[in-house]
Image (cartoon, rainbow, N blue to C red):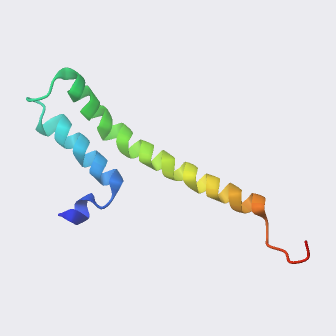
Amino acid sequence: MMTLFDCPERALLLAGLFGAYGLDGHLGLPAQVAAHSLVILGPSLLKLGYVLRLAAQHRLMRLEGPCCAAA
């Protein structure tokens, strides 16, 4: 069961699904709206953050250039 929550993207999706569909009778309307938006936005924001991190790392490696002992 713990391997199900190892991936943060999957954990956010499951938390959103549980809140949106499992607890819908116990939650108020603002909490239901937040849970439904978590189903889509949670994993999407994690993916966007990961891609931005990869782009930043790639840019840093490109700006540093190859290591040269003659400089």
Count of number-bearing discs: 0
For the point 30% across and 47% down, the residue is 12
Q: Position of residue 18 (x, y in %)?
A: 17, 42
Q: Position of residue 63 (x, y in %)?
A: 77, 58
Residue extending furthest left?
Answer: 25
For the point 79% across and 65% down, the residue is 65
Q: Position of residue 34 (x, y in %)?
A: 28, 30
Quadrant in which the C terminus appears: bottom right
Decide if residue 57 is on the left or right side of residue 49: right
Quadrant of residue 20 within the rendered picture = top left
Decide if residue 40 is on the left or right side of residue 50: left
For the point 21% across and 64% down, the residue is 2
For the point 37% across and 46% down, the residue is 43
Residue extending furthest bottom?
Answer: 69
Vertical placement of residue 64 versus 30, above or below: below
Residue extending furthest top?
Answer: 29
Q: Position of residue 57 (x, y in %)?
A: 63, 58
Vertical placement of residue 69 versus 22, above or below: below
Quadrant in which the N terminus appears: bottom left
